[in-house]
Amino acid sequence: MRLNFKRIEGAKPQDKPYKLSDGGGLYLEVAKSGRKTWRANFGFAAGEKQRTVTYGTWPELSLVQAREAHQLAKMEHRARRTAAAQGGPAAPVQRPTFRQVTEDWLRIKLPSLSNPKHKIQVQNTLERFAYPVIGDLPVDQITREQCIAVVKAAQEGGRVETAHRVAGRINAVMDFAIDCGHIQSHGAAGLIRVLAPRKVKKPMSSIAPEETGALLQAIATYDEPVTRLGLEMLALTFVRTGELRGMRWDELREEGAIWVIPAERMKLRVPHVVPLSRQAQQVLKQLQDINGDAEWVFASPVLRGHPFSENTLLFALYRLGYKHRMTGHGFRALASTVLNEQSGFPHDVIERQLAHKETDAVRAAYNRAQYLDQRRDLMQWWADWLGQH
């Protein structure tokens, strides 16, 4: 029986790793840690050793994408077997060009990117910088010197960030060529070593912990209730602004004690679990009275059928006198500082709650979220700390 989303999602870790077959040689290996990896084994011809190909992990690589990657690998494997079976000296297998491998990689990579602008950037940077130099070369003939030439050219004119992105994408394409069996190794790893270092981004504005009380008092005076409650919820949950403004009532679990943010709104593209403190639940009760009939928790009071705008909370902070002093992202910096310096909670627990290393990979899996009990305590500690300032 071929795999489907339900079987993959429901596969739980056991004492030993095990495999779920999708047919045709493709299988999902479930590790003891719960990590789920797409793999296939090739070989078994006379004198040929078995070779295991790894395509990626689920859910980052979906079932459809894994099947596409496996089909490409099988085509390459058959071509290699056919060439080896020819009488006399076998003609060398013609490897696909960098451009061809990139097109295959993009068919799998691009659907996983939710931002249309990012999709265009990924494709355009390779077309602009890599294709003129290595686009038509077979992947097994591309030298490290040629890759270096590409990224150095991309860096000209001060395009340091662009050059770093090009280096990463060339490396990803060549890694994909390995996974598909086209090559055994490549020289594109570590290309950033030949580039100027990236500029350190200026941190988002954030108040010092001792200024928290004054900010919260200012927020309490804001006259538009949905915006005021949005700022309060942002302070209590320290999620990203885009994650908050898209909040829906059906994302709440355990009678409002848990909020599960779906993968498509998360930076790491995996669901994120937010335990809600007593104070956060009180904010939601107030919002229920205002927007309980709407789809969105923070439904726009102006544009029906939409959440409030992207800059609503930022502009509210401006009106409260915090321009250049505090941003929506600043609540994350504030929480990180206070929790790491004052709370006593382990660093890993704090990092999970900040969604820096979130590992929850299935829908509504809040009951299996890593450190969930500690994170409940952490979020209540944070809400109480805010209440004391």
Image: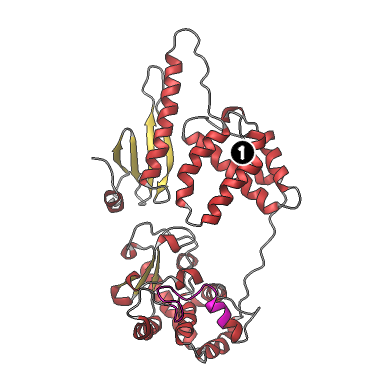
Colouring of the image: secondary structure
Please determine whether, in this image, residue 217 is positioned above or below residue 200: below
Please determine whether, in this image, residue 93 is positioned above or below residue 109: above
In the rendered image, residue 254, in percent from the top left (x then y), is placed at 29, 73
* Magenta residues (range): 300-316
223 or 173, which is in the foreground? Answer: 223
**Disc 1, SS:** loop
Residue type indicated by callout 1: Ala
In the rendered image, residue 327, in percent from the top left (x then y), is placed at 58, 76
Q: Is disc 1 surrounded by few (<14), some (14 to 19) or many (20+) residues within 10 Å?
A: many
Query: What residue do we see at 57% from left, 48% from top?
Result: 122
In the rendered image, residue 115, in percent from the top left (x then y), is placed at 51, 57
The image quarter containing residue 281 is bottom left
In the rendered image, residue 264, in percent from the top left (x then y), is placed at 43, 60
Please determine whether, in this image, residue 131 is positioned above or below residue 292: above
287 or 41, which is in the foreground? Answer: 287
Q: Does the magenta portion include 301?
A: yes
**Circle 1 is placed at which residue position?**
188
| Residue 240 is at least partly visible in this image | no
Query: What residue do we see at 32% from left, 70% from top?
Result: 250
Please determine whether, in this image, residue 123 is positioned above or below residue 45: below
